[in-house]
Amino acid sequence: MEPIRRRWRDLSLRKVLVVYITAAALLALALCEMTANLCDLEVRKICAAYPNTMERYYLTNERGERLGEGTYIGRDVIPLSPEDQRTVDILRALPTVTTPVWSALCILGAALLFYQDKLKRPLAELRQASEKISQNDLDFTVTVYGGDELGQLSASFETMRAALARNFSEMWRQMEERKRLNAAFAHDLRTPLTVLKGYNEMLQASGEQETQATAVTMGRHIARLEQYVSTMSQLRRLEDTRPSPQPTALASLATSLAESGGMVCAQAGKDFLLDNQTASPELSLDGAFVAQVFGNLVANAARYAKNTVTLTLAETGDGLLLTVADDGPGFTPEALEKAADPYFTGEKGSHFGLGLYICKMLCDRHGGWLKIENGPAGGKVTAFFGTGPEIR
């Protein structure tokens, strides 16, 4: 029995469908024949209830004995009653009427059985698997039902899932390895940089003007390397940071950001304006994430603004919009495309650096995004912080 079941599961969908349709057609033919026989039987029963008025004549021999069963000569038909006549008419028409009905019902039954037997479980399995993959959940196995087309598709889906799981595992391994290498690289650079910085200070104290000029140039490059090491360490910490949203009063948040932005702009000799368009008393936010993103954005804006930096706060149905705009030269076309890339360096007038990459990372962690564009007067960067379940 089991080999037969296995061969049935391995039949192609086309062959199984043909079998079901053939069986449905034969069943419909049998039902139609049965209906016709039953109706004919009922008609005969009704007609038999009426007596026969014909006279039977027999052949006889010379002794007057009857030969055979005789023969009817003449016929007087007794009409059926109106009710019986209607019943007979209905019974005679019923086989013709029920033929398409039986055919449709049998085809429908065959389709339902075909779906239940060959399609329902594999489709449900594939749908569930696709939903799990879309949620980055690869810790499952796709069950293969038979060797038909859907079974082959399920097997291919399982192969894809296994490949994705291996690739994701390798990707995470490489990311962790990169983090460790960056940390080791940053750690190993600190000691030689400290030594170089000490020697550079000694050279700058030299009485020779040419030596001092060389030492100043070396000092700038040493400071740049120190900043690079510091940002590598900071990025590693940020990659492991996750937001902790708490109910945050928007009025207090706006006041705090305005004070911070005002001090940064005052040091750069620029004016700072706040446009608070929020109406809700509070939102679920991580204040540290918002403050760090704003700090990077306002520092860039104050650096390149001519006179004024503007902070605009607005809320949407699922989060907070924080926009920092300035009246500077704006972003170059290349900067608009690559400003948030790590270690991207642009020409004068570009409002970016590693800070925008950090801002993009923090916004993404908070279920949001970062948008870089040019406004009517200069550069404009909008950070969105989500308050929904996508925060991770």
Image (tube, rainbow, N blue to C red):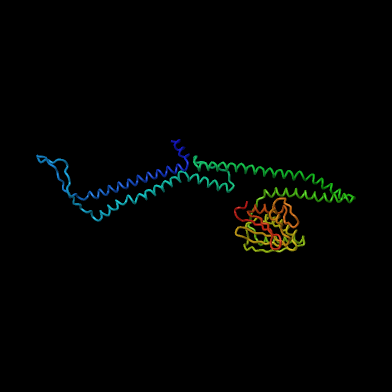
Image coordinates of residue 45 in percent, x first then y, are 25, 48
Q: Can residue 358 be seen in this view?
A: no
Identify which residue is drawn at 23% across, 55% down: 81
* Vertical comparison of 104 with 314: above or below: above
Image coordinates of residue 334 in percent, x first then y, are 71, 54
Given the current orientation, which residue lies at the most extreme right position?
Answer: 207
* Vertical comparison of 327 with 218: above or below: below
Identify which residue is drawn at 69% across, 44% down: 178
Q: Image quadrant of residue 317?
A: bottom right
Q: Which of 71 and 350 is in front in this view?
A: 71
Q: Which of 196 and 170 is in front in this view?
A: 170
Q: Can residue 79 be seen in this view?
A: yes
Q: Which of 231 and 78 is in front in this view?
A: 78
Image coordinates of residue 234 in percent, x first then y, are 72, 49
Q: Nearer the viewer, residue 188 or 157?
A: 157
Image coordinates of residue 60 in percent, x first then y, are 12, 41
Left or right: where 175 falls relative to 197: left
